[in-house]
Amino acid sequence: MLNRNPNLARLKAGYLFPEIARRRREFAAAHPEDPARPETRIISLGVGNTTEPILPHTCRGLTEGARGLGTAEGYSGYQDEGLPELRRRISAVFYRPLGRDAAADRDAENGLPGGTVRGEPFSAEEIFISDGAKCDIGRLQLLFGAGTRVAVQDPSYPVYVDGSVLIGAAGDWTEDAAAGRAGYGGITYLPCTAENGCFPDLSQLPEHSLFYFCSPNNPTGAAATEEQLTELVAAARKKGCLIVFDAAYAEYIRDPALPKTIYAIQGSRECAIEVKSFSKPAGFTGVRLGWTVVPRELTYAGGESVNADWGRVMGTIFNGASNIAQAGGLAALSPEGLTEVRRLCDFYLGNAALIRAALRKLGISRVGGDNSPYVWARFPGRDSWEVFAEILERCRVVTTPGAGFGPAGQSFIRFSAFGHRSDVEEACRRLALMDPASG
Amino acid sequence: MLNRNPNLARLKAGYLFPEIARRRREFAAAHPEDPARPETRIISLGVGNTTEPILPHTCRGLTEGARGLGTAEGYSGYQDEGLPELRRRISAVFYRPLGRDAAADRDAENGLPGGTVRGEPFSAEEIFISDGAKCDIGRLQLLFGAGTRVAVQDPSYPVYVDGSVLIGAAGDWTEDAAAGRAGYGGITYLPCTAENGCFPDLSQLPEHSLFYFCSPNNPTGAAATEEQLTELVAAARKKGCLIVFDAAYAEYIRDPALPKTIYAIQGSRECAIEVKSFSKPAGFTGVRLGWTVVPRELTYAGGESVNADWGRVMGTIFNGASNIAQAGGLAALSPEGLTEVRRLCDFYLGNAALIRAALRKLGISRVGGDNSPYVWARFPGRDSWEVFAEILERCRVVTTPGAGFGPAGQSFIRFSAFGHRSDVEEACRRLALMDPASG
């Protein structure tokens, strides 16, 4: 038979979230829920999966998109490159240039401010519709290939590293228990800690590297400031790096001073790709819709266009997002839809506020949750899988152990704000059952 | 900046279908359509894109799936691994084992016979729901990696080769105009010609290679017989090859003697992955839904499970097919839905019959179109891009030049049967305007 891709052998046991699901199943089998005792029910604040119904106007867009496929006028087949109307709408809502008094008229029109960019607005040809951010991140690796030098924030969303391993851009996994460090050879982990305000020391960013940067951050919940992003873009340009800016949670930003897109920073078009998604702002985790911006200005070292290559990669191994999802995306970006986006994000931010308050009461230090749906809690000196197990056993609440996001996540737990309100309230009550200082 | 993936530089100019679309646009710009003269309208028998509305029961499944997402009971988020109900239904409809008198009761239940397999039926864990065959084929390459030896039928669907180039499993493109040969180094092209009945000489299949085999074939329209597939499986087992069996057009098979799945052949579970799609049978090209069967029996040379790795790849760089598409897929596999599948395929097969008749009348030799939606027409001694241009100019009909599918497609044209009936009839009338013998 054929040989296994050696990169697959390099991947650590399981992708984080299936592993958590497995541990939850094991616990549930050993401790069955008793319907007569609601306190035995397991509540998940683990995976960042949306739980609330899609709001009416957006849902109508999806339903009408589906119904239309049954009619001669409404039928459509392959939409490889995405509906032009959706691409234009994304540009208008999220990438209106600064200086056009964009904020005022867009607020009025849309019910919420999107990001604003420096320079000209993006053309439809710079916006590629996809089936979601995770899938695009997996495909993006193909632009640079096996020899790429990769850098990530530590902790970070697992797909950046796992996708790099799959494409052969990483070496073997090594652990140094004594030093409390673990990671793949060839990947540069830039620690984001309480000490540096969750913003990495960019002097450690290797030259000519592909740098995955997520803001608002998953898992720390930290949203980078304009000053920090300016520093990031300057470092990337100086060092010849390309930033993959994951802005999947940008619609959770409520502080008007925080940029919602990397393109708000001068010079970013020459060094950044931005990946975005309808999953978290519109409840589309199961619907599957996102987009990636690849500015025309972006080139490789040899001068070739990254935008042209991305079109070629997408045309070769992708066949477009579902046209039903795209109809829903259009509805979500209408004025009514954008009001719904704001409402839905506000709901989950309300959950995050409850989680932060519960942790504060317990004296557990935490960041995030104000401009993001994740709260990042610190348990000094403890192993995060052990804390995960304790919270599951004592409180019957599923969380995500920080170590799953990288070496620097070791003594942290990520609480996801995605859940029904009553579940989050009940989980917060139960958290009082744990003893944060125990070990 | 970063270096470009050298594999991207190796890819020939454009993916075939965008290239055809570009030539069509150029022609249309130079020869504008005149609404007063219907004969100036361009008709496409080019890309295999479905044109007919989704039939009512299946469309209702999609619409209800979308509507349900707006309700607390019907909402769902990530469905990474696919709805268990859909996976079980696929197994029951397409992979019922031989010897259970499957044909009789399934016919009654479903309105159409699916494939039948040897051995036990597949479990849900062996069936992976995806957003379509092309996307899965792109991801499949990650199982084996850059060092893989790849073999394809020649001609073949471009993604097998282009995906292999992207992952680094191919060398440079070379052309030998004198010998009339062109192709990538490291890829073995197994000619499927009129002389060998479109079935390759398997003595040329390299040992331990990944062999992409498509039946009913795109582009030749040939459907392999049970004897041919038995020979294929025997060769793969003897040589330690893995077959990626692309059965995207299986529902177009009308000859009851022809197998609809590779698993009808004894021994195939140990050497074959099967890729399938709802696109062509249910009109889902824009909806995006497919599946891949990876039997538990499949192992690498080192004994590791291919099924486990596929789960890991899908969990890492994919996030599930749209749950709306999956609801539609379930409806399409109900008894009413399966009747619609048969009706829709019959419609396109009716188009294929018209195309075959028109070519016969012109004395052009052709294969396919009886158990597939493609007709493969031969223009001896001529360059296929030149014939493509002639048909576009004289008849204003877009086709696909055979050379786009591989070296052996050089003097062929693929006619797609996907189109409205009136367009296909008009295109067939116009074909009389061309002179097949000219050059």
Image (cartoon, coloured by chain):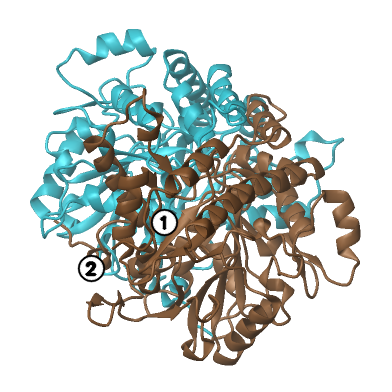
Chain colours: A cyan, B brown
Badge 1: chain ID: A
Disc 2: which chain?
B
Q: Nearer the viewer, residue B338 or B225?
A: B225
Quadrant in the picture for residue B259: bottom right
Rounded to the nearest angstrom, the CA distance separating label 2 from label 1 is: 17 Å
Give neighbour class at mark 2: few <14, some 14-19, many 20+ (Cα, 10 Å): some
Give the label on residue B6, or none: 2
Q: Report x, y in % for residue A414.
A: 49, 44
**B102 or A27: which is nearer to us?**
B102
Residue type beneath disc 2? Pro
Quadrant of the image containing the C terminus of chain A: bottom right
- Determine crowd level at label 1: few under 14, some 14-19, many 20+ residues with C-alpha closer than 10 A: many
Q: Position of residue B9 (x, y in %)?
A: 22, 65
Locate residue B373, reporting x and y percent. Answer: 57, 55
Q: Measured from the top left, where is residue B359 in percent x and y? A: 50, 57
Query: Which residue is at a point 44% across and 79% down the rendered structure image?
Result: B191
Q: To which residue does mark 1 refer?
A: A317
Tell me if I can see residue A3 in this picture. Answer: no
Q: Secondary structure at mark 1?
A: helix
Amino acid at pointer 1? Ile
A363 on left or right of B402: right
Q: Quadrant of the N terminus of chain A?
A: bottom right
Question: Looking at this rendering, what residue extends furthest in the left direction?
Answer: A238
Q: Is residue B45 visible?
A: yes
Same-chain check, marks 2 and 1? no
Indicate which label's residue lies in the foreground, 2 or 1.
1
Tell me the element at label 2: helix
